[in-house]
């Protein structure tokens, strides 16, 4: 489930700027080591699935705000 920042702001009463700052500071930490760890776990949970990317050349996902 995904919720847009403006939906969170509408419920919480925070400004959109504050919501984005809170999300970036506490929930959307972009860490390459954590990302690799998550992918290894995902791949291990589905051993017959063939990855559709080249791990070294895959660009990092753009930050969505």
Image (cartoon, helix red, strand yellow):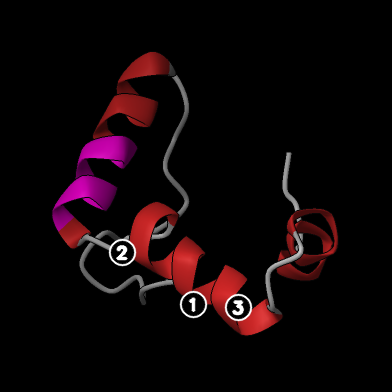
The residue indicated by pointer 1 is 63
Q: Mark 1 vs mark 2: which is more N-terminal?
A: 2
Residue 5, picture quadrant:
bottom right
Mark 3 vs mark 2, CA separation in Å: 13 Å
Residue at figure coordinates x 22%, y 60% from the top left: 31
Mark 3 vs mark 1, CA separation in Å: 6 Å
The residue indicated by pointer 3 is 65
Name the element at disc 1: loop
Please tell me how crowded label 3 is: few (under 14), some (14-19), or many (20+) other residues with Cα within 10 Å.
some
Furthest residue to the bottom? 17
Residue at figure coordinates x 20%, y 67% from the top left: 56
Residue 60 shown in magenta: no
Are circles 3 and 1 on residues that touch, CB within 8 Å? yes
Residue nearest the observer in this picture, 25 or 41: 25
Q: Which quadrant holds the N terminus?
A: top right
Relative image position of residue 47 (x, y in whole percent): 37, 17
| Circle on res. 49 | none
Relative image position of residue 42 (x, y in whole percent): 38, 28
Please tell me how crowded label 1 is: few (under 14), some (14-19), or many (20+) other residues with Cα within 10 Å.
few
The residue indicated by pointer 2 is 30
Please tell me how crowded label 2 is: few (under 14), some (14-19), or many (20+) other residues with Cα within 10 Å.
few
Relative image position of residue 15 (x, y in whole percent): 69, 78
Q: Which quadrant holds the C terminus?
A: bottom right
Judge from the rendering whether residue 64 lies leftward or rightward of residue 7; answer left or right. left
Name the element at disc 3: loop
The residue segment tinted magenta is 33-39
Are circles 1 and 2 on residues that touch, CB within 8 Å? yes
Query: Does residue 49 sit above or below 57 in this rendering?
Result: above
Residue 18, picture quadrant:
bottom right
Residue at figure coordinates x 82%, y 54% from the top left: 11
| Majority secondary structure in the magenta region | helix
Judge from the rendering whether residue 22 lies leftward or rightward of residue 55; answer left or right. right
């Amino acid at each position: 489930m995904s919720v847009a920042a403006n939906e969170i702001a509408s419920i919480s009463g925070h400004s959109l700027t504050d919501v984005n700052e809170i999300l970036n500071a506490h929930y959307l930490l972009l860490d390459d080591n954590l990302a690799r760890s998550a992918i290894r776990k995902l791949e291990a949970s589905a051993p017959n699935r063939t990855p559709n990317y080249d791990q070294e050349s895959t660009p990092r996902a753009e930050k969505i705000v």
